Image (tube, rainbow, N blue to C red):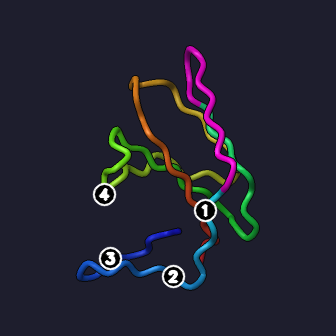
Amino acid sequence: MIIDDLIDGVVIIPSNALPAPTNLTIIKDELQISLSWDEVQGAISYRIYGSVDPSAENWQLLSEVPEPEWSTPIEQSMFFYRVTAHSGQ
């Protein structure tokens, strides 16, 4: 689910929202974290968000990529990730 806007405590979800990517895989080696997921039909990009707290309301946008994969150097011992698909609309 993509949250497009929040107005007076009500979540607004656009009608053109794409489904969440599935089968997210996270691989950690000595130097980096690599994420990959199944491609979402209609997606032109994917946004990767991160947080040190999985219950946090605001997650930091880390990157936007055109392919269903992303890697980053390891910077923290514990970090949580979310991936959303976007159609560009």
The residue positioned 55% from the left and 17% from the top of the image is 31
The residue positioned 56% from the left and 59% from the top of the image is 84
What label sits on residue 87 in the rendered view? none
Q: Are marks 2 and 1 in contact (CB under 8 Å)?
A: no
Looking at marks 3 and 4 on the same chain, the residue that comes earlier in the sequence is marked by 3
The residue positioned 26% from the left and 78% from the top of the image is 9
Circle 4 SS class: loop
Circle 3 SS class: strand
The residue positioned 61% from the left and 35% from the top of the image is 26
Quarter of the image for residue 89 reads bottom right
The one nearer the camera, 2 or 70, is 2
Using residue 32 as the reference point, say whether residue 38 is left or right of it: right
Q: Which residue is mark 3?
A: 6
Looking at marks 2 and 4 on the same chain, the residue that comes earlier in the sequence is marked by 2
| Number of marks present in the image shown | 4
Using residue 56 as the reference point, say whether residue 70 is left or right of it: right
Looking at marks 2 and 1 on the same chain, the residue that comes earlier in the sequence is marked by 2
Report the magenta residues as a range: 22-33
Q: Which residue is mark 4?
A: 57
Q: Amino acid at mark 4?
A: Glu
The span from disc 2 to disc 3 (Cα, nearest Å) is 11 Å
Q: Which residue is mark 2?
A: 14
- Which residue is most to the bottom? 15
